[in-house]
Each structure stands twice: as C-alpha cells, then as structure tokens.
Image (tube, grey):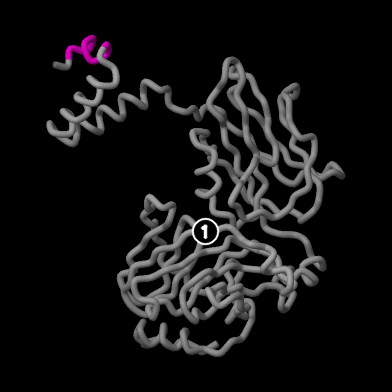
Amino acid sequence: MACIRYGETITAKIQKTCDSDVEQEVKTDRKAPESFSPELTTESSYRFRCPGPGEFQCDSTGLVFVMAQEAELLYRTVPWEESLLQSHGKKPAGPLFDVKSSDEAAVCQLHLPHSETEEVLLLDGLLSVVHITDEGLSILEPLEVTRTHVVVKVPHLSLFGLVWNIIKRVLLLRVEGKILVFLRPPVSEEQTLDVHLLQKNVPKKEVADQHKPAVNITISTDCELELYKGYSVHCEPEGFYIQPKSKRFVSSFGPDYDPTFQVSLTTSTKRVDLKLKDLGGNEVWSYRVSLEARTKPKNDGAREVVDAVRNKGAAASRVLINALRELDPYLYSYLNLS
C-alpha cells in the first residue's frame, strides 16, 4: 500500500490509493472517513452527492466510497443468488450492493463493512469481494482489510458483495453480532417484542423497514455470536411467553428479516431484563429494556397529516378538504368545512 506523506493534496492521495497494487493486510490506524446521511428514494435506494475527492461513509449501510471527484451515488441492497457462489466455494458475508454513479470513473474504491472479530481477521484469504456484472461473476481480492471494512478497487460499477471462503470459515465461527429489539403496537392486553440476532454489518434500516409500525427500541446491541450455535432468550420478570425456546444462529442478509425470538408481554409491563444465553447456560448479552416507547395513536397520526398539509398553504388545504368531502361526506359536514 502506498504511503501518504504530509503535504500531499487530497487529489494526489486519492490517485495513489486508486493505483495501489493488491496487497491484503489488516490496517488499524486509518483516518476516519467523512460520514454522511443519504437521501432515501422512492425505489428504496440511497442517494448522495459527493462534493469532491475524499472518503465518504454512509451512516445507513456502513459503505465507504473513495472518490476521485464530485459525483452522485445511487445504491441499494439486492438479494443474493447463493447458487452463483457455490461453484466458487463462497458464501455471503455481507449484503449485496448495487452501486451506480453519475460518473463511474469518479469511484476509485469501495470499503465494504464486515463483522469479523480480530482473531478471525488473521485467517489469510477468508474474505474477498464478489463483483457481478452482465458478463458473470468475478472475485476481487482485497487491497487491505481494516478492523471494520474490506477494501477493493472498483473496476466498474455493478453488484458488489462481501463473501467468505467456506472452508476457511469453519476454522473460526465467531462473528461480531448485534441484537435489535422491536416493540409491536399493543393488541388487546398484549404486546410483543421481536428480538433479532444479526451480524453487525446488516443495515439496521433494512430490518426496521420490514417491521413498521413496530418501534425499534434503542439498546446496546453489540455482542459476539457463533455461527450455527444454539441460543435462547430469557426474560425477567419471569412468566412471559417466549418462542422458540432456542434457535441456531445463522447468517442472513435479506431480503427477509424475520424475528429470531418473540416475547409476549402484558401491556402493563413497563420494562424487562432481556438475556441471551447459549445452550450451555453462558450469558452472551443482557440489557434492561424500557417499554415506554409506544407507537402513536391513530388520531395523532391523522393530526400530523392535517398539520403538514396546513403548513403547505391554502391550496394544499383545499385539496385535502375536497378529498375529504368525497371520501367521508358525514365527517366533512360534521367539521363544517364548507
């Protein structure tokens, strides 16, 4: 990897980075890239306009783009076709990203987030990146591996996804994981917590989007998990129904993110202590979860819609009033909106 000296311009740094030879190593002292929040499009894609050369990290997906110049990025996750990987002895180790740009030459590198522990990173050749185009599938060897990302040079934009070498993966099965907890809207006297066991590089937004209108409860999510190992969830106070009683942890990168466990609670429950244990009884993760997060009542949602329209002015308000007159004449008359 070329050494960057003080005093070099950012353009020169990016050029050296783009032209560096393939050399896999674990880096621990990278300068943090500039973080950005992407715009979300109606096609469930992320959009961002890079202002110029530099390294930019998406705070929704963890992707880092190394840019040589200004350009607009459009990217999204797409389902894996694992049958394409089998003949290469590979298995998905992260989401598959479809990346496009207004100027393909502007994107020099991609840094794809991984979920490996430091001991696993010592396994040479474990991680690589699949590049899928209309011509087929190719394997990109990393330029380097950091504690959080796998770095590859971009030949041209298309589908990129992190993969494991299946044989080397079985030597060490531990990964950095995260636990996401969602609280469903109450039904009668019952409410449900959906507990997800995931690898750390699964984008939280992708999971949350599938569980609306459930509330994602803010918790400490980090833990270490072992692939194909059985785990169980425990709850204090006791007496609540948890299903299933245990389940093996396997990696999943969509398109579906079903809960690993479901905890059924009474609506009077204000907080619970959740614990994750392996089947040997060892505690892997625990957290006191507050259940004060509630979805908004329907009338609050309607009020927000009305307020939003009113803020747009008289023309928008008239459109809403005319629509209400056609859809619900009784309410229109009751509210005296004529």
Q: Which residue is drawn at 72% across and 28% down?
A: 236
Magenta region, residue range: 330-336
Pick the front one: 289 or 154: 154
Q: Position of residue 215 (x, y in %)?
A: 51, 35
* Residue receiving disc 1: 77
Q: In which quarter of the image is the C terminus?
A: top left
Mark 1, Cα crowd under 10 Å, few <14 / some 14-19 / many 20+, is: many
- Secondary structure, mark 1, is strand
Q: In this view, does 256 lie above or below 297?
A: below
User: Which corner quadrant of the image does residue 337 belong to?
Assistant: top left
Relative horizontal placement of residue 28, taking residue 88 as reference (left or right): left
Residue sitting at 48 percent across and 89 percent down? 19
Which residue lies at the image location 17% right of the left edge and 12% below the top edge? 336
Residue 57 visible in this rendered orientation of the protein: yes
Is residue 25 one of those drawn in magenta? no
Residue 167 place in picture, x, y as percent: 80, 71
